[in-house]
């Protein structure tokens, strides 16, 4: 009987078959009178080796089925659907309008945290003011990603970070748009329903690039219009912005997968000779690192643990991305990634513990205010990043002060 990859698919050798074949082989080499019982030395050796070989066969079977839509999962499924130009939907935070009551003309600042009685927290992401009627409305976003933030109307009623002139809060409408990371069954279903036109070539190439170990991150932008776009990409073009990877590796991916009739745009170029001995030149771009500076002002309670400011710094780096240095140990975090802008409220929210970025909740913070910027001293609440930029933060660029 044939095992492994056959015309009938993958056939795995079972443990009993492994033991049988090993015993037959031993008897043919050592003689028919050899004691292969489970209590004998040779028999025990066969059983131990059979356990290891059985695990190897199972792993080989897993690798085989990881290449197919219906039998793959997790990262393997991501790679399968990427071949068809489909990308797994990322988790999202819920959005809600918060209505604050207070003293007219009192400011509603970015970073005010409110919550439901069950402790589901939201943070304001835009500023406003209490109007003459005593009310002001601004947008807020859930701290955590997922459906947990899709709360009903009139359930966000507690203010965690009291501000002068603000008395109460509520949400006249339900919070919406929160979702978890797309599940495997959802992704498979969407892939099957994507239509005869298939998925995006940009998504396909982007995922092929990101699957390469030497490539840190990649993002492929597409201009499918008949006019240049706002970032200068010509009509019917794609621009791959790639961090890491050699030009030769990038060129080999492009020559096998770049769609015909689509111009490759960028500042860098690589020429590859195709199988007909014709030189093909592809352009791409490298991201520009933009160093971020952060100033944090903390008002503590008696629950504050001495030294927690290091956790606060680490949480910020986990969000932005960059290098966290504690003594002789440096840890690199990928953060939000390429082309992602940053708001100061995201760093404030990170101190409450954000599952998606694995930040740690810091106890003993009564109030926290964070300013960010690309120069010192940082004085902004928002830093924009273009599609060709990657924001980065290092420990020495974070200042923490206490009041």
Image (spheres, rainbow, N blue to C red):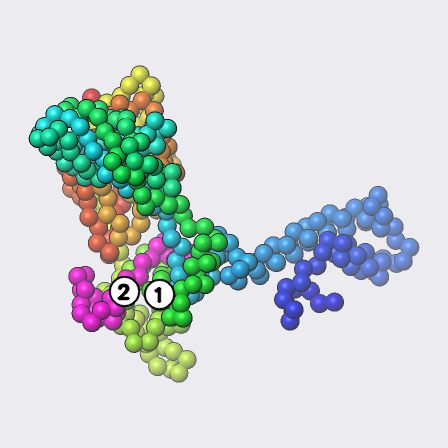
Furthest residue toward top: 302
Q: Quadrant of residue 365?
A: top left
Q: Is residue 333 magenta?
A: no
Q: Specify whether residue 217 is painted magenta.
A: yes
Circle nearer the N terminus (2, 1)? 1
Q: Which of these two is toward me, 202 or 247? A: 202
* Residue 204 visible from this viewpoint: no
- Residue found at the far right of this picture: 33
Point 47% across, 58% down: residue: 188
- Residue 366 in percent (x, y) is at 26, 23
Give me the disc on residue 222. 2
Q: Secondary structure at mark 2?
A: strand
Q: In the rendered structure, find residue 200 and report the number of the disc placed on it.
A: 1
| Magenta residue span | 208-237
The quadrant where residue 320 appears: top left
Label 1 environment density (alpha carbons within 10 Å; few <14, some 14–19, many ≥20): some
Q: What quarter of the picture does the N terminus occupy?
A: bottom right
Task: Indicate the position of residue 146 as horizontal and vertical percent values.
Answer: 38, 42
């Amino acid at each position: 009987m044939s095992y492994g990859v056959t015309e009938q698919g993958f056939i795995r050798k079972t443990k009993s078959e492994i033991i049988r074949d090993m015993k037959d082989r031993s008897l043919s080499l050592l003689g028919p009178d050899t004691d292969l019982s489970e209590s004998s030395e040779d028999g025990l050796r066969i059983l131990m080796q059979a356990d290891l070989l059985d695990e190897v066969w199972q792993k080989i079977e897993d690798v085989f089925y990881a290449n197919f839509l219906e039998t793959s999962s997790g990262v393997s499924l991501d790679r399968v659907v990427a071949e068809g130009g489909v990308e797994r939907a990322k988790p999202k935070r819920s959005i809600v309008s918060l209505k604050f009551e207070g003293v007219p003309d009192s400011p509603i600042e970015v970073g005010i945290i409110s919550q439901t009685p069950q402790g589901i927290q939201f943070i304001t992401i835009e500023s406003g003011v209490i109007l003459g009627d005593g009310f002001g409305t601004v947008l807020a976003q859930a701290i955590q990603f997922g459906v947990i933030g899709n709360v009903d109307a009139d359930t966000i009623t507690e203010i965690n970070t009291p501000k002068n002139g603000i008395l109460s809060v509520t949400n006249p409408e339900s919070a919406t748009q929160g979702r978890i990371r797309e599940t495997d069954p959802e992704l498979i279903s969407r892939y099957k329903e994507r239509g005869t036109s298939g998925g995006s070539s940009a998504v396909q190439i982007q995922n092929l690039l990101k699957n390469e170990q030497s490539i840190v991150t990649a993002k492929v932008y597409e201009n499918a219009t008949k006019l240049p776009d706002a970032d200068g990409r010509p009509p019917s073009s794609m621009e791959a912005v790639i961090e890491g990877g050699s030009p030769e590796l990038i060129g080999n991916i492009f020559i096998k997968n770049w769609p015909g009739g689509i111009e490759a745009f960028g500042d860098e170029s690589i020429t590859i000779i195709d199988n007909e001995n014709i030189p093909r030149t592809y352009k791409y771009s490298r991201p520009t690192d933009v160093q971020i500076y952060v100033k944090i002002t903390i008002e503590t309670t008696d629950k504050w643990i001495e030294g927690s400011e290091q956790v606060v710094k680490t949480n910020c780096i986990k969000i932005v991305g960059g290098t966290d240095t504690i003594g002789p140990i440096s840890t690199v975090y990928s953060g939000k990634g390429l082309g992602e802008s940053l708001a100061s409220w995201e760093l404030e929210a990170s101190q409450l513990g954000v599952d998606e970025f694995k930040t740690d909740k810091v106890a003993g913070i009564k109030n926290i205010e964070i300013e960010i910027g690309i120069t010192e001293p940082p004085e902004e609440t928002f830093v924009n990043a273009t599609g060709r930029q990657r924001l980065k933060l290092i420990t020495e660029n974070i200042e923490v002060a206490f009041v």
